[in-house]
Amino acid sequence: MKLVGIAASFGKAAAEAMVLSAPPEIDADRKGPRSEKERLMTAVQDGIKNLSLELDESKKKIEGNSAKLEMLEMHRTILNDYVFRKGIDGYIEQGYCASSSVMRAAEDQAATLENLGDPFLSERAQDIREVGKRLAYSMEGFSEPDLSHLEKNVILVAESLSPALLSVADCGRIKGILTRRGSRTSHVAILASGLGIPTVVGCAGIEKIRDGELVFLDAEKGTASFSLSEQEKERANEIIALYEQQRADLKKYQACEAFTADRKRIRVLCNIMDTSMAEKSLKYSADGIGLFRTEFLYMDKPRLPSEAEQVAVYRSLAVNWKGRPVTIRTIDIGGDKPVESLHLEAEKNAFLGYRAIRICLDRPEIFLIQLRAILRASAFGNVQIMFPMISNISELQQAKSILEEAKKQLRAENQPFNEKIPIGMMVEIPSAAILSDKFAALVDFFSIGSNDLTQYVLAADRTNQKVASIYNHLDPGVLRLIELTIRNSREAGIPCSLCGEMAGDPLALSLLIGFGLEKFSVNPGRIPLIRNLLSLIDFKRAQTVADQALKQSSSKGVADLVNGTLSKEYRNWLQDGDDLIG
């Protein structure tokens, strides 16, 4: 049987399922003796002690993940909170048992914060509920499993997984993660990606998986297969063995330049979300940073990052990459990436609403701080600025105007920066692609965001599994806009890259080469594979195939066309046989 979710951290794995049990239900109306105060004191003391131990372990194991440390510290603070403790005592005095009192007091305090109408305080309400549940569960004899000393390789299967639990886990034994809840930008997805653990989130139906049974996880495609026959188990193990062998074979492409089979030079850059991913990309000798997702500096934080904090991050990237381009995208928030400290109102269709550059132009005081930080970092290396979600010329002009204001301020302060810093834009809205000839005259480079472009062209939310079959970047409508953008950039004499998931899709690679794309920006772990596959593509033949693809009427037609023209050696990297599993 096969389940479909969201691929959050690439890779493949086959191992026994370790199903993490759901916590018990707590009856908030259950009464108990007044001696429950003593039990409460013991539980609180144990809770504080355990959180302190987790903090110490986390500091050792998750360097650079300050959001996780802040979360644990916040939970410890809540346990020590006088108002929270007084509320618990009050319910115990009324005759409720300790665990019921904890749940009631936590809900009271959380509801008070929510009623204030402040999104940030509403998020803190969830923290209070989480601490309350954790404390109540411990009183009922329930504790989270100890993942720090696993005896065998496992795939974790859970409703959800806390970053605190994963941060102290024996990650060498955790071969994969499968959760029913979560998104690509959830805490666990970000942490798992940094740890290199294949992860699929947002996967309905995981309750059917039995503890201890073999699970085949394909976090390239977002699938999980289980209830396998003996033949399927053998095939799963063969696929993993092939996958591991391929990874070993790719080591020779870890530190080399990329060329097509007929020696056309192609740049392979990396997409990163923090400095730890940047360090990993350096190991792969990426040609630069094609996309730094700065929104992750803003997410899951109680306040916005200061200019000094941002300068420190951007400057370290500029220095460490020693002249290679570091493309810093201004905050792309909203949609599936909320930022609690901005106090944004919930929207029915956030992907079409108040997000990214629209927020920045509406909140110039926030935008200016980030632009000043990027400009200051440009004095230390080859830094580039990129604006996301540009839909019309006016937005671009406004963004450039605010950038000029930031430059003016820095000049007045005698702050050094690169006066000629390259300015680029994401082409991820259909209007931007259609008008790419006009935009090309106003910027120094393009970066095509295939993820958003695909969902906007096809009107299919990329996070909604109900329309997953519609969302496909091989759709001819999407391909035509990508080809148009690349052609217009070439005619204008400006570079163009592609930084969405399409850039790491082996089936799309030859099409993009055929369209004339010379820069690919991918997740760090994909760099060796992309270099290898590029070496198997003949540029002139790819041009012919790409021209034919634009004449197809469906994504299936495109896929069949490309598959029919790939060399046997290239197809060996695609034919992993996972369609035979489940």
Image (spheres, helix red, strand yellow):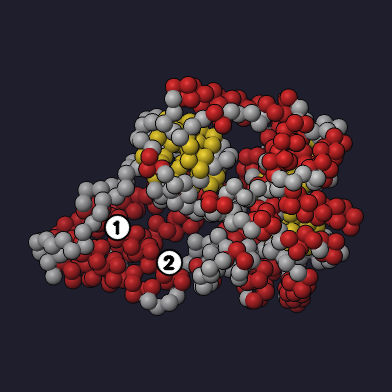
The residue under the point 67% across, 68% down is 357
Crowd band around label 2 with a 10 angstrom C-alpha radius: few (<14), some (14–19), many (20+): some
Expressed as whole percent of the image width and height from the top left, the position of residue 240 reads: 54, 27
Q: Which mark is residue 123?
A: 2
Residue under the image location 41 percent in, 70 percent down: 122
Q: Left or right: 357 with respect to 103?
A: right
Look at the numbered disc 2 and give the secondary structure of its residue: helix
Q: Which mark is residue 514?
A: none
| In-front residue for pair 363/81 | 363
Q: Nearer the viewer, residue 357 or 152?
A: 357
Q: What is the three-letter code of the residue carrying label 1? A: Lys
Q: Position of residue 242 (x, y in %)?
A: 59, 25
Instruction: Tell me if 453 is positioned left or right of 565 in this view.
Output: left
**Residue 391 seen in the figure:** yes
Residue 506, given in percent of the width and then of the height, sits at 69, 37
Camera sees residue 63: no
Camera-nearest residue between 469 and 513: 469
Three-letter amino acid code at the position of disc 2: Glu
Image: 68 above or below 414: above
Horizontal side, residue 120 vs residue 88: left or right: right
Looking at the picture, tell me which residue is in the foreground, 507 or 292.
507
Residue in the picture at 38% in, 73% down: 114
Looking at the image, how many numbered discs can be counted on the residues?
A: 2
Query: Which of the two labelled residues, at mark 2 and mark 1, occupies the earlier sequence position?
Result: 2
Q: Residues within 10 Å of mark 1 (few under 14, many from 20)?
A: many
Q: Quadrant of the N terminus?
A: top left
Q: Residue at x 52, y 39 (%)?
A: 223
Residue with the mark numbered 1:
133
Q: Quadrant of residue 310?
A: bottom right
Alpha carbon of mark 2 to alpha carbon of mark 1: how far? Answer: 16 Å
Q: Where does residue 41 sit, x and y in percent of width and height?
A: 19, 59
